[in-house]
Amino acid sequence: MLKYFLNRLVWMVPLLVGISLVSFLIMHLAPGDITSTEASFNPKTSEESRQKLRELYNLDKPVIVQYGLWLKRMSTLDFGHSFASHQSPVFWQETDKEGNVNKGMIQEALPITLLINVLSLGLIIAIALPLGVISALTQNKLPDRSITIFVFIGFAIPSFWLALMLMYWTGVSHNWLPISGLHSLGAEKLSSFAQLLDTLKHLTLPILISGLTGLAGISLFVRNGMLDVLHQDYITTARAKGLPENTVVYKHALRNALLPLITIFGLSIPGLIGGSVIAESIFAIPGMGKLFYDAVLMRDFPVIMGILTIGSALTLIGNLLADLAYAWADPRVRRGVAQ
Amino acid sequence: MNAILKNPLALAGLIIIGIISIMAIFAPWIAQFDPDAINVKNILLSPSATHLMGTDGLGRDVYSRMLFGARISLLVGIVAVGIATIIGIVLGAVAGFYRGWLDTVIMRLVDVMLSIPTFFLILAVIAFLTPSIWNIMIVIGLTSWMGVTRLVRAEFLSLRNREFVLASQTLGAKDGRLIFKQLLPNSLTPIIVSSVLGIASAVLVESGLSFLGLGVQAPQASWGNILTDGKEYIEFAWWLSMFPGLAILITVMGYNLLGEGLRDALDPRTSNNK
């Protein structure tokens, strides 16, 4: 197991270098260089801040040196300071000369996005799993057909539209749920339990949105996985030796059908992180997605580059965890029999 | 073709996409109003016989804007997927045919691209360029070729040593002939299926970008930005946010149905065990 883990860890290094190269290339996409006025949404960009950009990315040095310096800064997780937001550090907190602590922007936004995504993953599992199993067990009958229609709608529904509709229905016309931000006005005066409840209420809609849009894929996946497994010889054997149908389905089939799901969750991380842009900007949740969206609008390059890199690193870590979980659950993988 | 028409999913998808494409192509003749004509006397009219989908906050006819928006959605979807498919075929063919270090480099590049959250990547590129319909198409295309590459490579790897390919090679066929006459035609089915499904997700991405104000720019109409306008009036003009959302939903569903139907109809493996 340890060897497998180290092996996977070493694999991440070339990927990280590749990510740094891609993000470096993106930075050089802009016509002229990123400090030129036409590349700026914000006409008020001062000569001073342009000079800062040049220094930050060493734009006066040869390209290869620029990349080397960028790689070096990335490896120390130094993404500089935001241009738009009072010079806040992009990634992690810093203490200035007077001893004041300046919180990092990603440091503050990341836990919120992670919380939303973990909770919506929970929601997805809680709903998609039974749907997929029911669908597989009633293949081509009415429940399966209805679930399939639901899956097709789920694949096609634009998350921002669903968000708007839910926001209007639950927030505006019924006033059930708060539709914006993370806390109610004056929430800091409440007890800590009431504060937690208040935050959860604010998070309900964003979690529903990212959960509902991710549901379709997972339930389809569970259905097809179950169908595959149910046609295997060992299921026929289990039935032939007279095991009750429930034991066959839930103990023999489901367990094996769920294994690949671990990988699917790993693979869905970039989609979830990227998808947070839409939900968070609609509901004004101060997470990674909103931070990124605002940075794009303001052309706050250090923040854009920081989030792009951290988001990719998170994806790699997520994939690593998924691989480890898979190896833990399936001895064939860790002994190198399969794949 | 017969197989496609007999498959209910594919047929339903084909009909949906057909109708929407006809409406998009003939938009200038179907539309009763200029989609960009502002009319302050007709602000926020609810749907009626004259204005089938009502009017927006500037008095523009929503139905006409929806028709012209359909053009944008279909165009962006098809061009973006065209770009992605061409890149995917070239890289996948090179990797699968020549293998060796080229294969390693290309596949690692695929891994790298897949580990960057796609929507972040698209937004970052747009931040460094300017949002316009052409940039959107190129950016979506350049960030969605990884699936096709893997697919073409896998097909090529499995076909490369089959007898008909080896026979052709023994007869002196050059690499180009092997790739274009033998391997590629035999890998077309999965490529077509993944392209059709790719259009569906490109339509979703474009409308999402336009909704966020980073895609197609006003006054040019797109379903995404009609919805953004509608957001302001959601409390008293439901039609402004209802129709664009439904249009995106139906279009994306049409492509998904067509793609899944094609997969079933054209792939003997899945149609047998169903």
Image (cartoon, coloured by chain):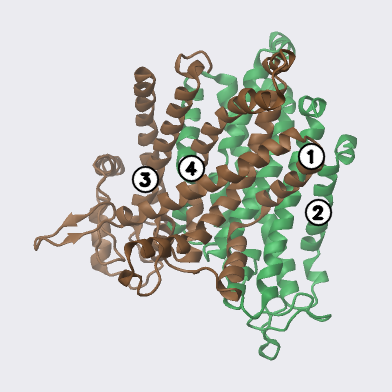
Residue A80 appears anywhere in the view: yes
The CA span between labels 1 and 3 is: 38 Å
* Residue designated by label 3: A309
- Number of residues whose C-alpha sits closer than 10 Å to that of mark 3, classed few (under 14), some (14–19) or many (20 or more): many
- In the picture provided, is A188 more to the left or to the right than A292? left
Relative horizontal placement of residue B67, taking residue B114 as reference (left or right): right
- Binning the other alpha carbons within 10 Å of mark 2 as few (below 14), some (14 to 19) or many (20 upward) gives some
Which of the two labelled residues, at mark 3 and mark 4, occupies the earlier sequence position? 4
Tell me the shade of chain A: brown
Vertical side of B81 occupied by B226: above or below: below
Colour displayed for chain B in the image of the structure: green
Give the SS element for disc 3. Answer: helix
Please give the residue where the numbered disc 1 appears in the rendered image. B261
Circle 2 residue: B16
Spatial separation of the CA atoms under disc 2 and disc 1: 13 Å
Pointer 1 indicates a residue of which chain?
B
Residue at 61% x, 39% y is A129
